[in-house]
Structure formats: structure tokens, C-alpha cells
Amino acid sequence: MDQAQQILINTFGYNEFRYHQADIINTIINGNDAFVLMPTGGGKSLCYQIPALVRDGVGIIVSPLIALMQDQVNALRQLGLRAAFLNSTQSYQEAEYVKNALSNNQLDFLYVAPERLLMPATFSLLSGACISLIAIDEAHCVSQWGHDFRPEYQQLSVLPERFPNIPRIALTATADSRTRAEIIQQLALFRAQTYVSSFDRPNIRYIISQATNARSRLWNFIQQNHPQDAGIVYCLSRKKVEDVAAYLNAKGRTALAYHAKMPAAIRQQNQERFLREEGIIIVATVAFGMGIDKPNVRFVAHLSLPKNIEAYYQETGRAGRDGEAANAWMSYGLQDLITLSKMLEEGEGSPEYKRIIKNKLDAMLGLCESTLCRRQMILKYFDETMNEPCGNCDNCLNPPETWDASIDAQKALSAVYRTGQQFGVVYVIDVLVGKVDARIRRHHHDQLAVWGMGDNLKQVEWRSFFRQLIAQGYLRIDSERFGALVLTEKARPVLRGEEKIRARKYSYKDNNNRIKRNQETNLRAVDQILYDALKGILHSPVNTLWMKR
Ligand code: ADP
Ligand code: ZN
């Protein structure tokens, strides 16, 4: 272990081990298997890199992404270590060169894609080599129910047979207890020591809000909190990526697009600029980010709903890897939910698979619509208990107001019922607030008793409330019928007046944008006071009332 400590200090330049690094490294050095759950940015790589240097032979690292391999290999080479990779991007000669180095015991690390490792030629090559350990990075890719499923990963179960006496270490940053069990099963890690570090990322502030004026609110958020910082903005579609990047550029920031359909060379170039230059915003689909190790990403913004909490956690986890304060900001609307449900419905997979994916989406919506501490909810999702609310999320900082919404729930649910459970939320709200248009007339819905009964709430307020009714399972969206709202069994007692409902009030003031960092407003103290006073007026109740009209 002394040797490991020496390598940590002399080779990697760090003073001490973090989390369970020391124990994990010890386990592997002693020839045992390990299963490591550590949050993104926790320092998983050292857990196999150091034992690979201490033990004899080459460390084999199975990694799902080619870009990620290249980065890691480059980083290791810069430290003067002997690292190489084998993947499909290489020329025959390059691959031969690596194979020769391997046969001559000239490598400390060999990164391989799973499909490459599983090729018989690679197996025979490796069986002749002295191997120090096998690391399986991003091990959650083995899970069928996860968000990064890669079928080749499941075949890695042959490793213990093929390489019986070589310690294996599987690592991941995202795994609920079901996925954990699946990883252990699929990778045959029955004798592995399991190390779970807390998933809490206390320096990340979670902020989630509704989708009205999302783009301009995003801009306010960036301008007020991150006028010069690097950040990532995630969007669901390629088109939105391009629109938002153009918008931010027009505002004077350097924003670069990143999505799967752009030429690989430009994508690569944008990624490299983001990594090297300071203060760049990358606007991306979820294709961006796995393995991105930029420590000072100060914010991650979502302009749409992530498809599950794992993805949300992983994407937001790219902020603040240096441990300094960072923001995870999200703005989402019901349309995202409809789009995602539709994608799920139309996608492949058994009904059982779709049900699990749907449940994960529901949990994500539940997180967004909750009035509880976001961090407590996220950690609970990963089976971790946090006893007190965190004090560093929007719900903790500005506790949402709630109201007794039992009557409004009856109005909403009966409007859905009376219009025949075949309309989307926009139409149902139009009926509730008493709108008359050709469509409503044609269906004679202006004759219904519920028509106009909801004029006590504004349209945005109804929208927010409908999201909550969906999140709490009183309504569901029928994605096969264009997002029509349908009552669930749970709606019955509410309609009968047997169940009370409390709901979170729609907030007109954008609390989320008021995270002050005075040093960044660049205002002199007197100006700051004036500025704050003005803001106070803007957000006074009188003014809020005025804004409602
Ligand atoms: P992960 O793979 O868990 O997301 P990495 O292995 O990429 O995380 O490590 C994240 C960052 O933390 C890297 O910049 C790494 O060099 C740094 N790091 C890892 N271990 C330590 C340590 N013991 N002390 C200081 N920094 C560390
Ligand atoms: Zn909180």
C-alpha cells in the first residue's frame, strides 16, 4: 500500500486518497474483485490505474466510448505512463503496433471497446500476455433497464472463465439497487467487495422550473449567475440545439453546438474548444458528455425533461467536478413529457421493458413537481437516506407555497372526464377557463357544466397544476392518442370528494434566477444596494399582482 501512496503522490500529484479509493486499491492489489459506485468526478479512474501500476503486467480497461478512451490514454501518456488503446478507429498498423507492445510487456494500460475485447483474436492475444487486472468502466451499460444499455457488455460474463485468476473491478456512477444487482449478476462479480460512496454532490445547487419563456429565463440565469463561466445546455432535439446556440451567440456568449447529426470533425472540434478554452457554453443533445473531464464547468442547464433521474444525475454531475459551487438548472414543460412518452411508445422493447422505462420517467416528473428537497429525493432514488433537507436546492431556498387544491382537482378531473378523455391539456384548460372557439363549439363543450368553471386560475397555473396531477398519478397521458389526458383509478376518490389534495402554487417570480453572487454582478457597493432595491420593487406583492392581470 505504501507503493500505491507513492504513486498517488509522485505520479498523479495528489496528496491523499478520496472516498474509498484506498480500500478499493488495496482490494485489487491483493487480487480480489471490486464493485465500485462513486459519483461522477469522484475519482474512479485511480481505483484501477494505481493497482495496474503496482501489480505486474498490463491493466485491461473495458470502456464503452472511443472518445473517452482516447482522452484517458492521452492523459496517462502525459504522465509518462505506457498507455494504448485498441478500437475500430485505428489503422491496421497502429493496431499491430499496440499488439506488439502488448506481447513485449511494454504496456501499463490497454483500453479496449467491449466488442473488440470479445473478438477471438483479442482473446488469444491477451491469453499470452501478463495481465494485472481487468477494469470494466461504466458498468451500468450492462443493465438492460438502464439508460446506456450496450448488449456487448452482457457478454463480459465470460471474463472470469477466460481469465480466472485476474482481479476484476467494475465501476459506475449510476445505479439504483436493481441495476446494482443486475451488474453483479451479469458480470459474475459474486465475490466482489462492494464500495458505495455517497452520491451527494453538495456543491451542486438543483433548480427546477416550468417551461414558460424558457429561453429568456435561461439567458437571465446565465447572465446573472455565470456571465463568464463555462457551462453545458442540454436540449432534446438537434434543431433546438442549433436554435439555442444561435440565440446565446447573438447574446454575446460563445456557444457551440454538439449533436449526433453534425459532421464528426466539427463536433470533435467544438468539444475540444470547450475543454481547452475558458468560458465556452456547449449546447448539446445528451450525446455530449460521457467521460468529459472538465473540472470547472460551473453550470449544467436542461431545456427539457431528462428521461430519468439517472440521466439527470449524470448530466448535472458534469458541473462542479472541482468541488466549487455549481448550478444545475432545468426548465421543462408538459410537452417534453408527451414527446418522451411518445418516443418510448414508438421505440423498441417488450411491454415489461417499456413499463420500467415509463416508471423512471414518472419518477423524474415526480422529482420536478415535488415540493420537497430535491437532493433528498435524488439520493432517496439511489437508495441513500439524507436526514435533513439540503438547504441548497430551489425548494429548500424558496419553499414553494401550496394551496388546498381539492376543489380545483375536481374541476380539472371532471373537465377531462366530461370532454371524453380524448383531448390534450391545452384543450381541457381552454374549456376550464371558458374559452370559445370553433373547436370547442363544434364539440358543444361550451355547454358543459365545467366550461368556464376554472376561471379562478390562469392558464399557466392550470398547466402547472395538471403537471402535478399527472406527477401524482391522478391523470396519465395517452401517448398513442396525441397526448390525450386519461383518468386513472386514483382519480375516483378525488372526484367523489373523499380525498384532499395540496398542490404547489405556480410562482410568477423567477426565484431561481436570483442566486446572488455579487462579485459577479461587478457592481460597486452603492450600485449593488440600488440594484437590489429595484429588484425588491420588481418582486413586491403589489407588482406581482399587477403582473398577473
Ligand atoms: P470519475 O471517473 O469518477 O468521474 P475521475 O477518475 O475522472 O472521476 O476523476 C475526477 C477528477 O478528480 C480528475 O480530475 C482526477 O484527477 C481527480 N482526482 C481523482 N482522485 C483524486 C484524489 N485522490 N485527489 C485529488 N484529485 C483526485
Ligand atoms: Zn434541498
Image (spheres, grey):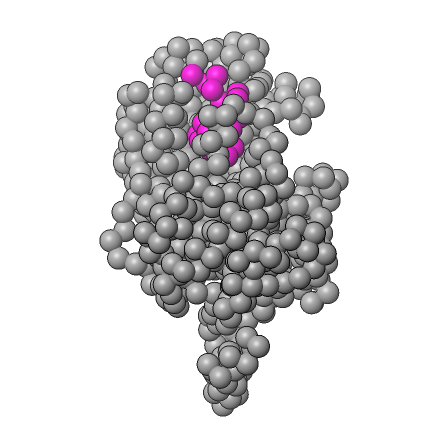
Q: Please tell me whether residue 353 is drawn above or below residue 266 in the rendered image.
A: above
Residue 430 showing in the rendered view: yes
Give the image location of residue 105, x and y in percent: 49, 20
Most extreme residue toward the right is: 263
Residue 148, above or below 454 = above
Q: Quadrant of the N terminus?
A: top left
- For image coordinates 30% across by 20% down, the residue present is 190
Q: Which residues are magenta?
A: 137-157
Residue 456 drawn above or below residue 370: below
Q: Residue at position x 57%, y 10% from top?
A: 121
Which residue occupies the foreground of this view, 442 or 107? Answer: 442
Which residue is at a point 75% across and 40% down the rendered structure image?
A: 263
- Reply above or below: 348 against 419: above
Residue 148 drawn in magenta = yes
In which quadrant is the C terminus drawn?
Answer: bottom right
Name the residue rendered at 47%, 51% in the picture. 413
Answer with left or right where residue 113 lies relative to residue 309: right
x, y percentage for residue 485?
Answer: 54, 45
Q: Is residue 502 magenta?
A: no
Residue 120 lies, in percent from the top left, at 55, 9
Q: Position of residue 58 (x, y in %)?
A: 45, 23
Q: Report the side of 363 relative to 284 (left or right).
A: left
Q: Nearer the viewer, residue 468 or 157?
A: 468
